[in-house]
Amino acid sequence: MKSKRKTPAAPARDIKAEMVDLFRERGAQTETDLIRAGFTKEQIETHAPGVAEQLRAQEFAAAA
């Protein structure tokens, strides 16, 4: 008889944080760069505006 135990779900990725980290490591990235880094086009379209806003806020805070 097969066990009905479910395998633990993989932890959810924090795409936005991964993109911010990538920016800090490598600087500005094109869509092609992000795709090569393992992000999907949908993830890029969804998260890139928030990443840009977060980076601008951090630059502004550092300049103040």
Image (cartoon, grey):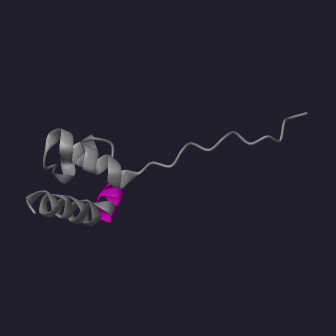
Residue 8: % across, % down: 66, 41
Magenta segment includes 13: no
Q: Is residue 18 above or below residue 49?
A: above
Please state, as top left, top right, bottom left or bottom right, where the N terminus lies in the image: top right
Q: Is residue 9 left or right of residue 61?
A: right
The residue sitting at the right extreme is 1
Magenta segment includes 42: yes
Q: Residue at x 33, y 42 (%)?
A: 38
What secondary structure predominates along the stretch shown in magenta? helix
Q: Residue at x 50, y 49 (%)?
A: 12
Q: Residue at x 83, y 42 (%)?
A: 4
Q: Residue at x 19, y 39 (%)?
A: 25
The residue sitting at the top extreme is 1
Q: Is residue 47 above or below residue 24?
A: below
Q: Which residues are magenta?
A: 40-46
Q: How many marks?
A: 0
Residue 61: % across, % down: 16, 61
Image quadrant assignment for residue 60:
bottom left
Please state, as top left, top right, bottom left or bottom right, where the C terminus lies in the image: bottom left
Image quadrant assignment for residue 2:
top right
The residue sitting at the left extreme is 63
Q: Is residue 8 left or right of residue 42?
A: right
Q: Is residue 32 left or right of residue 41?
A: left
Question: Who is closer to the viewer here, 29 or 31?
Answer: 29
Residue 44: % across, % down: 29, 57
